[in-house]
Amino acid sequence: MKIAIIGAGNLGKSIAKGILNSNGATHMFLTKRNTRSIKDYESYGNVTVTSDNKKAVKKSDVLIFALQPSQMKAVLEEIKKELTDKHVIISTAAGLEIEQIEQLIGSDKYILRAMPNTAISVGESMTCICSNSKGESRVELAEAIFNRMGSSMIISEHLMQAATVICASGIAFWMRLIRATTQGAVQLGFEAEEAHELAVKTCSGAAKLLVESNSHPEAEIDKVTTPRGCTIEGLNQMEHEGLSSALIKGLQRSYEKINSIKSNQL
């Protein structure tokens, strides 16, 4: 399978690494206006780096557009004459609806939206996928691509904005929580490197515990909270300070922002 990633910025490069490291493409084309920062990808041997979007489209079967929403119109108009009935088009542009893409290149194309996160570069992304009517027959192909780099979930398009907040922006939210835990550990006496390792591995263990036990967070919390113990004391103080409320409000604010971006697309 020949895959082109149109727009090899931070997300595009993460997707590329995930696909290449899982042997998910026979050949890959990476495009960027200035290719200097992605030249090292040619060391994989089956990667062509180019600034020519048309060339990448002509030689590929699956096209992953990892562009900013504001860039999509110009690029789609540039390459639309090169599109054939073989191409599968996957957009990761936040807030850009399938209907808007159809208006530019036609509803007779296989058009999908995917929202991965940057953990895709280490095979741990949670990717949400939706499609137009034509693209429904290619959803399994998209799942096969993204499941090699983590997990995927098929959702309705009306939930894609929320998925962007929870999964893509969510990486940053979790990073901030890990950073705060690290800072707390330093204040309690650990060296910075030790504190970082403690925070990261505890976070990773908590997530893995939920995945493998199929348990609910509160059930696992109950296992480590004892009457008048230090865990419940800490949890209650965090809630008094608004931990859960702040997280929920942050998600809501992010969701409001992405909806305002959506209203100004194309």
Image (cartoon, rainbow, N blue to C red):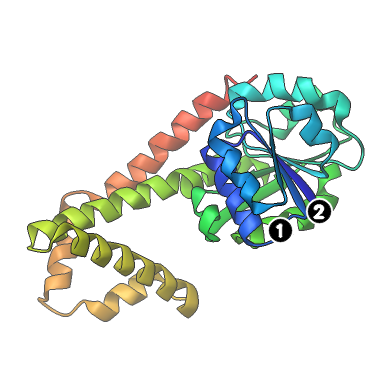
Look at 52% across and 30% down and name the residue there.
259
Q: Quadrant of residue 207?
A: bottom left
Left/right placement of residue 132 relative to residue 151 reads right
In percent of width and height, residue 193 lies at: 21, 60
Left/right placement of residue 9 relative to residue 206 reads right
The kind of secondary structure element at disc 1 is loop
In percent of width and height, residue 263 lies at: 57, 22
* Kind of residue sitting beneath label 2: Met
Q: Earlier in the sequence, mark 2 or mark 1?
A: 2
Residue 262, compared with residue 165, is above or below; it is above
Quadrant (top left, top right, bottom left, bottom right) of the C terminus: top right
Left/right placement of residue 253 relative to residue 118 reads left
Q: Residues within 10 Å of mark 1 (few under 14, many from 20)?
A: some
Residue at image mark 2 = 1
Label tally:
2
Residue at image mark 1 = 24
In percent of width and height, residue 121 lies at: 53, 54
Q: Residues within 10 Å of mark 2 (few under 14, many from 20)?
A: few
Q: Quadrant of residue 253?
A: top left
Look at 77% across and 35% down and name the residue there.
56
The kind of secondary structure element at disc 2 is loop
* Residue 154 appears in the figure: no
123 and 47: which is toward the camera? 47
Report the residue that reaches farthest toward the right: 85
227 and 98: which is toward the camera? 98
Look at 34% across and 51% down and name the residue there.
175
Asked if the residue under mark 1 is in contact with the one under mark 2, i.e. CB atoms within 8 Å, the reply is yes
* Residue 180 appears in the figure: yes
How far is the residue under mark 2 from the one under mark 1? 8 Å
